[in-house]
Image (cartoon, coloured by chain):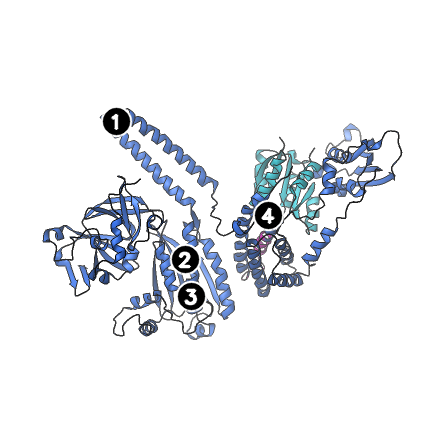
Chain colours: A blue, B cyan
Amino acid sequence: MKIDLSQFRQVFLQESADHVASMESDLLALRSAQDDTELLNAIFRSAHSIKGGAGSFGMTSLVRFTHSLENLLDRLRASEMQASDEVVDILLRSVDVVRALLIADADVEMPAEALELAEQIEALSNAEPALAQAAGEEAEHPIENEREMKLYVVEFRPDRELFSSGTNPIVLLRNLASLGTVSCCHLHTEELPSLADLDAAKCYLSWTVELASLCEEAELREVFEFAEHLAEISIQCAASPQPVDAPLPAVNLPQQTSTALTTDRAPALPERKPGRRKTDQVGDSGSIRVAIEKVDRLIDLVGELVIAHVMTAQMVEDFEPSCLPKLREAVAAMERNTRELHERVMSVRMLPVGTLFQRHARTIYDIAQATGKQIRLEMSGEDTEIDKSMLELLGDPLIHLIRNAADHGIEAAEVREAAGKPAEGVISLRAFHRSGRIVIEVSDDGAGIDTEKIRNKAIERGLILPTAQLSDEQLRMLIFEPGFSTSETVSDLSGRGVGMDVVKRNVQQLNGSVALDSEKGRGSTVTIELPLTLAILEGLLVRVGDRTLVLPLLSVIETVPLRDEQIVRVAEQGEVVMIREQSVPLLRLSRFLGLAQDMTIAGQTSEEAGNRRLAVIVEAGNRKVGLVVDELLGQQQVVVKSLERNLRKVDGLMGATILGDGCVAPIVDVAGIASMNLFAIQSHALLPAHREGTVLSNTAKRT
Amino acid sequence: MRKVLIVDDSVSMRQMVGYTLRQGGFEVIEAEHGQDAIDKLQMSAVDLIITDLNMPVMDGITLIQNVRKLPEMKSKPILMLTTEGLGTKKEQGKAAGATGWIVKPFDPEKLLQTVAKVLP
């Protein structure tokens, strides 16, 4: 029987990735708690588990490296040495090596840096080099010589306490017998006490066995391997092959046990599997681990749904008008179930944001090391759950923000002290829920953003006119414009300040928004707001012309009736509506999406039609826009279908959905619209891209 | 069918040992750490325990000591899953009442042979 364990490789890699991450965060925590044995134990266990599994998949370099690491950790654990900053640094670098080796091919040679690091570790732990040791182990197994039949006399005298180790002497004797032919087995009962004195939990017996076998003495000894400390065992080779009457080699030729003992002397590591390549690596495995309780609840819900369906179907079958209230009830039950099922299924995709935060503890540590700044990371809300795909897409934006905070935000210790601040800067990562959205904040108590500098730079870059009147807030938002940098020195760490525009773009792709708050000398806070999931949203259905559109309800602030006298035309630019003395730019959805040709800007439509119209005020990224619609139709959950996947990207739309009656309704991309230059759109003819909006005809039925 | 309890904090290790034993015709139950194992043993006795030594909550050595205090598990075999180079641990395990050991990384066939070495 050949048992193949390679199917468990993926589980091992995923588990090891978790171990690597927790090793990293534990090591970072260890810096401020050098003697914390619990932390050291946890780190040791992680390294140990990786090593234990790696061997099963032929990952020899990884085994050797984690072996060295384990020795060092063992010494730290035993308090034979201190987890000084230097040691922690080496350990952190080791974590990088382990991570790299996990991703690499199983049979990869240890890279030069890893070898060097291993040497450093070995020097620190005074351990024998793992490489030499491994070689030694392999040398233990000599090539088998030709076998000859020998006669052995085996004496087995167990201690009284043999049973307490769970050892069963019968099993040992049976195993011994399987190595050859027993010609005589003598049981010694001399020490057996009288029944009154007998303790059934003690062993009073011993045995002498004569065995003819092809095996070497060492193989016989191996039978007693586990009992050596609990018994006196003597094995004597009584004689060389005896010419006996009965042909001895009627011996059960080394069967199961002994064959294995001899053929299994291959090096401890199984065969390499050259077929396994980088396809099954840790990162993008596309799989997700889900707690069993979550799955169980889903199955329950599906069960309830099936029951509700059967009931409904039954009622429809035997329908008579008096059934109507019952039918309504059944449909309501189904709706409740569906809604809960939806929530539960979504929660399957949810992962705590903490994993993402943990990764950045290391980023900050590295920056602090490289720049000589003192930076502390504070985290809160790590348990806040977020959709797995969003978690992955958030990685890059977050790293930009954190690097910016550490590199440009936090000042050098002297500068901070001169400004009367503590030498150690604090970067805090917070995650929490706010009105159905997830908020992630990255803030620092550093220098803050100098709006005057931004203004100068923006003028220099031609982003704004020297005469432009912008509020501080508007000035700060300029750093999210492409190609904007405020750092005077270009550093390796956060590069040239490109990235902030990328941050904004990435977050907007996730239907989220970014805001920046900063006070000079006190620090900055970047706030990212995201929907809980990308797949389903609460929508406000509106009618524009003869079409139905969906607005994401979360971005809707209010709806106001639109009267012509409220609309102010800004020369050559477009329209704004005055709401409580605030001017909000207006966008006529019909015109924007090219849905109706007869709609024109205010004043040119009939007064009656104009008065019946509504403005839905939506907000994204601190900008408000009034969307002109003809009618509100209601509110419902809609499943977002990608346009890009089925058609192509259409500016101003984030996707489409299929309504209850089978019609396709476009979903308006509020964040996208808010970031556009509305005046330019309104005062010019439709952009070609927008005209494509007509493709999304409402009448297209679902196939 | 004889029942084996596997105790290891590593999911992949439990799965691999479990798979190997099932292939070998054993019934397998799993526990994440020593305390979990003790809890599982309260519910059903087993014929063999295979346990890792380094685990959170309750380590393998403590588990072995505790198992030996359970009347129905007093003389049942316990195998330690260890990596080589942990000589002292192995000794501690033996002193605590372990029957034998399996070296990680384990070879599946070898594992079944080791089990045969201790199970009647």
Residue at point 54% right, 62% down?
A: A31
Q: Position of residue A263 (x, y in %)?
A: 72, 42
Which labelled disc corresponds to residue A323?
1
Q: Are the residues under badges 4 and 1 in a single subunit?
A: no
Provide the secondary structure element on which disc 3 rests: helix
Separation of residues labelled 2 and 4 (CA atoms): 32 Å
Q: Nearer the viewer, mark 2 or mark 3?
A: 3
Amino acid on which disc 4 is placed = Met
Q: CA distance from mark 2 to mark 3?
A: 14 Å
Picture disc at residue B55: 4
**Mark 3 neighbour density, 10 Å: few (under 14) some (14–19) many (20 or more):** many
- Of helix, strand and loop, which one carries label 4? loop
**Spatial distance from mark 4 to mark 1, Cα to Cα?**
61 Å
The residue segment tinted magenta is A31-46
Chain letter of the residue carrying label 1:
A
Query: Which marked residue is nearer to the observer: mark 2 or mark 1?
Result: 1
In the image, residue A207 above or below residue A505: above
Labels 3 and 4 touching (C-beta < 8 A): no
Most foreground residue, B104 or A650: A650
